[in-house]
Amino acid sequence: MTPENILKQPARILTSAQREDYFEKGFACVPEIVPPALLKRIQQTTDDFVEQSRQVSESGDRFDIGPGHSMDKPVLRRLKSPDTAHDTYWEFATGLMADVAADLLGPNVVFHHSKLNFKWFDASDTVKWHQDIQFFPHTNYNVLTIGCYLTDTSMENGPLAALRGSHNEDLYDQYDKDGKWTGMLSDEDAAGVDMSRVEYLTGKAGSITIHNARTLHYSPSSKSPVPRPLLLNCYTSADAKPYTPHPLPTSNTYKIVRGKAVKWAEHDSRPCQIPPDWSGGYTSIYAAQAGEDNPSGGMM
């Protein structure tokens, strides 16, 4: 569906201004939208997983840990696929967040994936400039990610930052000059980003960020010793069909969470870069950007 047709659909959660803001800029930020009781449940569940991560010494199917991780000092970079890790996360993904997604994708919404990213007091936790859609190309660009801040997030602890209008511009090459997948812009391309168009999406706990899969975005490193968790859920319109294997499928991948399945795919004429073959598995954007994955950029 086009933005014009989507905006004709009655809103479930977002205001008209918030919906229009998303389509104009490629992103939006909605303050303190998550009810306090629900937010507290998610925060407690997340704290429990951080405690569990103390027991692991290397990254695996559930935890992606960073350099220096230990029992005494956990450095959990990502909780993978929280939608299958605990019912609280899946209820959140299929509840309030699915309603938000429907306001921006149209009535028929598909769940794609979830992840819970953390920032620690370490320069290595920077997520560099990138676009999401090159990780999982679809037949059209009605693909978005909704992030929920689980702690108050300011310029001190690494908020999401996005480039206004970049969802309507060309996609970048996210391979390096040797053909290795990096999942980010080259240093040269990153240096050319017009920082006057960048908005930092700060907010208190329970606020959400929403960005289109074409939108250029990054997050700076945290300057706070308190970890900053961001719970992310990705959705597509039902008429956006994947071209390539899912990077990290779960039992919930491609489930219809609003509306119904459709009989026809819609195709956008704009090209999309094809990623490596993810059928062998995927670690995380942190690992890719740090060069920790298979150097060939192929199966991981």
Image (tube, rainbow, N blue to C red):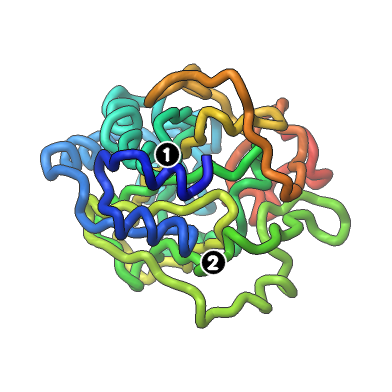
Label 2 SS: loop
Which residue matches tag 1? 233
* Whole-percent x, y for residue 280 in the image: 72, 27
Seen at 71% across and 32% down, the residue is 243
Amino acid of disc 2: Gly
Q: Is residue 115 above or below residue 229?
A: above
Q: Are marks 1 and 2 in contact (CB under 8 Å)?
A: no
Position of residue 62 in the picture relative to residue 71 (left or right): right
Position of residue 276 in the picture relative to residue 287 (left or right): right
First-in-chain label (1 vs 2): 2
Label 1 SS: strand
The residue most toward the left is 37
Which residue matches tag 2? 165
* Whole-percent x, y for residue 209 in the image: 37, 54
Give the quadrant of the C terminus.
Answer: top right
Badge number at residue 101: none
Seen at 65% across and 55% down, the residue is 289
Amino acid of disc 1: Asn
Q: Is residue 16 above or below residue 164?
A: above
